[in-house]
Amino acid sequence: MEKNNLGKVVGLVLAVVLVLLALYWLPQVSVGDWSMRKVDLLADVRNDSAMRQLLAGDSTLAGSMNGDTAITDGYQPPYIADSPVLQGSRLTRDKKGRLVTLEDSIINAKAEVTKSRNGVTSIIDMSDGAPGGMAGFYRALAQSQSRPVRIAVLGDSYIEGDIMTAMLRQLLQQRFGGQGVGYVPMTSITAGFRLTCKHTFGGWTQHKAVDRAGYVDTYNNITGNYFNAGQGAWVNLTGIGTPYSLAGTCTSSSFYFMGGAGSGYVTAVVNGADSTYFPLNTNSVVGYATVHGNIKSVKWIVTNPGNMIFLGTSMDGNNGVIVDNFSLRSSSGQHLRKVPANIMAAFNQARHYDLVIIMYGLNIAGHNNSAYTAYCHTVAGAINNIKSNMPGTSILVVGCSDREERGANGWRTMPGVLGLIQAQKRVAIDTHVAFWDLYSAMGGEGSIVEMVQRGEANKDYTHINHRGGNRIARYLYDALMLGYENR
């Protein structure tokens, strides 16, 4: 008679299920900005509707989430699984008695006195007129016909390859003047799919803030990159002009390096013909050489570089708007708070920014159920460093975009994204700068799924492509213009 092993199979299956269920209580492993996904066998059936009702301000949750105890102003909520937004956020009530986080209550109160327009998610300025608010940038825009107005967009892989910034630059230049692609590092892993210029290079050794091996903090700077050069190292930028027409030419190009008194020099070859030589020395911490003219392409070549440090080059207009894309893959912006004061100030003197847009966070959002304390500390430190050493610069914190995961009930925004947005609001409030809610502007939950379906985002349901970047840029441009027109 054949032996029946059904009982053993059932027992084995039950044992495996119990082990998987038990793994939920294991601590989450993190290395730097990366976190191992939490093992949760019931993730797709767990009811997280309470969190979403909380974000919508549903006061009926007071009992369901905290027993029969009423939630009062200043209450520090306990940890609730799959609800990271509650950690580090105090609960309060708005004017209508609805339950909201303290951050939302403050942001919403400020939004009530901010000029609005249908279809536009307004920028909320938390500065109350203090340095770091948007007023300085709006004043600069009004002067754009007589001087360059520079914007630095600091972010991670979400904007690499000039995604989003290409269209933002085009829209602003169409209205306020300007041309060129702005600042470009000596080398880039995304040069091949950048649509605003052809970027080629050779002979450089790159050092990145996200790769600590070989990165010397003495040379840390706002870009998160610096380079050593071999003999004859070169970088070439050629404007493309389609689909972003104003990126095709420029009237000036600069070459940036860390100051010194070396014996080397750099040669600028403009449009393949005219050559100009500049010594590689300066009395400033950050030095630069600049050529002017009707520039379609420019090649910079280094001779006798010695041990000098190099940063990047640019294609700019002499007036109008300049938008620099400082993308740094896998970064949370930590390097910004560690930039030495003299380097931050010197870079700002060489290339002054009227607006700094901070777009970090996507790398640490997702399943992570942390309170984002370290993130808040990092970004607040970066903002305070910018305020101290780049006086007069406006600062705009952009909230995290939608990032989704698929469960048994369909797509949902990863819980960590909602927590991160609360943390970003908290940073903007605490540092008295401006905040723009990208998550709401793009449509909230499900918006990245719709972008994937339209061919505007990748199927990781996280990163946008150039088409999606154009859409996001228009949302941000509309928000900036609303603030400018009501300044």
Image: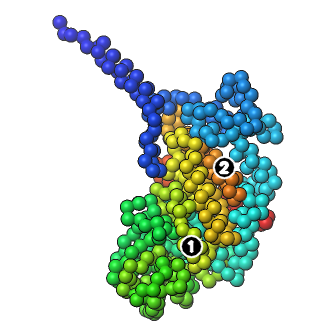
**In front here: 286 or 291?**
286
Q: Amino acid at mark 1?
A: Asn
**Residue 1 visible from this viewpoint:** yes
Residue at 63%, 41% (x, y): give it: 88
Looking at the image, residue 70 sits to the left or right of residue 414; the answer is right
Mark on residue 303? none
Q: Tag 1: Cα neighbours inside 10 Å, few (<14), some, or many (≥20)?
A: some
Q: What is the quadrant of residue 275 in the picture?
A: bottom left
Disc 2 crowd rating (10 Å Cα; few below 14, some 14-19, many 20+) is many
Looking at the image, residue 26 lies above or below residue 142: above
* 19 versus 462 height, above or below: above
Q: Secondary structure at mark 2?
A: helix
Query: Which residue ends up furthest to the top in the rendered image?
Result: 1
> Quadrant where the C terminus lies?
bottom right
Q: Is residue 221 above or below residue 447?
A: below
Residue type at tag 2: Arg
User: Position of 295 compared to 440: left or right?
Assistant: left
Residue 322 visible in the displayed image: no
> Which residue corresponds to mark 2?
426
> Is residue 337 toward the left or the right of residue 311 in the image?
right
On the image, the x and y values in percent for residue 127 come to: 74, 59
Q: Position of residue 333 (x, y in %)?
A: 53, 58
Of helix, strand and loop, which one carries label 1?
helix
Q: CA distance from mark 2 to mark 1?
A: 28 Å
Q: Of 432 and 413, which appears nearest the observer? A: 432
Residue at point 53%, 85% (across, down): 283
Residue carrying label 1: 342
